[in-house]
Image (cartoon, helix red, strand yellow):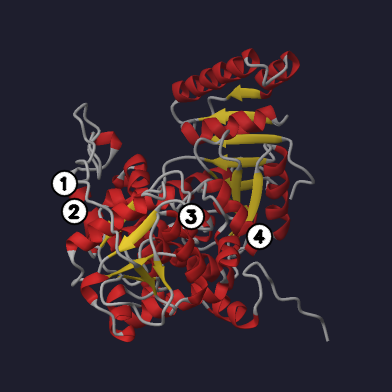
Amino acid sequence: MKASIGVVGIVGAGAMGRGIGQIAAQAGFAVLLFDVQPDAARKANQLIAEQWQKMLNKEKLTEEEYQDALENLQVVDDMQELADCDLIVEAIVEKLDAKRGLFQQLDGIVSDACILATNTSSLSVTAIAAGSKIPERVAGLHFFNPVPLMKVVEVIDGLLTSADVAGQLMAFASRTGHLPVRARDTPGFIVNHAGRAYGTEALRILQENVATFRQIDQIMREAAGFKLGPFELMDLTGLDVSHPVMEAIYHQYYEEPRYRPSVITAQRVHAGVLGRKTGRGFYSYSTENTLPAPVENYPAWTDTVWISQANPDAVPALTALFERCGASVETGAQPSDTALCIVSPYGTDVSSSVASEGLDARRTLGIDALLVCEGHLTLMTNPATDALIAARCQSLLLGSGQGVSLIQDSSGFVVQRMLACIINIASDIVQQGICSPQDLDRAVTLGLAYPVGPLAWGDKLGASRILGILRNLLSSTGDPRYRPSPWLVRRAQLGLSLLHTEKHTAN
């Protein structure tokens, strides 16, 4: 391979190719931009130049940097003009045959030392490399859209990729100002793989009629700190994009239950209800008022409140919460005959708490205490809960100044289920050796904008607690989607961080 990369060819002048060409030229590489439609490459060049002009006007580029970048970027009309490139990055249509065919063409043009990189987001790098006479020089270089703003890039080793090739691509990505993360060639690589739980578990909760999509979005934004709720995100991406990805990763992993798609999104795709791009998805994007109907106000609960001791870790936070709301909290082992009964199970439902603790189901509700009752609160009924008592409890908790969602009985509430699945899938990614724990957390926080890396989140909440939630979910539902990853199990048992990696010594 080349000792270093100096000349970079970009094949495909769409949004991805344009973005890669922009950051490479800004970083000082000589960039040759090619598209089978010459007008497309020239239009991309013009758009990049306009972007640099805006950056110059905002003093994000100096005059010298601006002129250098313009000189570094050239349009070529013939693929033969890529012959002297040290690196070719393809950003063409996401079809295996097309990418294989392109690399076969390039084999006859570039030197054997030229690195061939694919920006595929969903295809096997190994399968693409099979189209080249030198598969060792083929690797994945997966940028995210918009490239200049999304500061992470996945460097993917195909089965036969040379270590030297991957190392040079890591250096190339770093020079562009992006953070490179190394991944093995597996479905979804790191970011798309780690993001599976956020959509699929939310759809599962919706399918079980536990909460509305609006409630799920609000809980994940205001309690867990996500920028967008899962249904807002699906509407933004478009179900014509997100649902096929769900199905592809599910089938590529041979029907692994953790990645199971939902009939809800399949039906919406068939109906053409795709999200913002069609004016209607889970939400309506018409000019009409689409706000939910106002919630009817009920008088707050005024009798005493009894807090179950079954989850002792949650008792202090729950006691402080209800006292802030002006409630009188009972401290006895059993509730009085008129007290509101509050339980806080991890991974089980309110009905199970009622049965195991011998409580009056009519006046028993659950609160999710996983996040120490900070931010938005989730209040959960059981099938026998008196509706008026539930409404009065919600009114009482609104006195804390926090939002309160009232949902139906579910093993694991909303946040518990969502975060446990996110952490579990992340644990299994590193268990499979797809990437390092540190690269996983960095990739997810940059690529998916999660408020905390999944493994660091597991450490913050407690690996043992997350393990307990998953085991309870598995036991109560019988669904293997909740089976805990060995990575999580072993570190929880030993009291180790989920970011901990084994250190082996040679004999």
Residue placed under numbered mark 1 in the picture: 271
Q: Label 2 amino acid?
A: Gln
Residue placed under numbered mark 2 in the picture: 267
Q: Are marks 4 and 3 in contact (CB under 8 Å)?
A: no
Question: What percent of the width, then of the height, locates residue 402?
Answer: 41, 48
Q: Is residue 292 above or below residue 195?
A: above
User: Of circles 3 and 1, which is in front?
Assistant: 3
User: Of circles 4 and 3, which is in front?
Assistant: 3
User: Of circles 3 and 2, which is in front?
Assistant: 3
* Image mark for residue 350: none
Distance, label 1 to label 4, CA atoms, is 41 Å
Residue placed under numbered mark 3 in the picture: 374
Question: What percent of the width, then of the height, locates residue 81?
Answer: 61, 30
Distance, label 4 to label 3, CA atoms, is 27 Å
Residue placed under numbered mark 4 in the picture: 438
| Earlier residue among tags 1 and 4 | 1
Q: Is residue 182 above or below residue 120?
A: below
Q: Label 4 amino acid?
A: Gln
Q: Is residue 230 visible?
A: no
Q: Is residue 410 visible?
A: yes
Q: Are marks 3 and 1 in contact (CB under 8 Å)?
A: no
Task: Pick whichever, 70 or 264, lies toward us.
Answer: 264
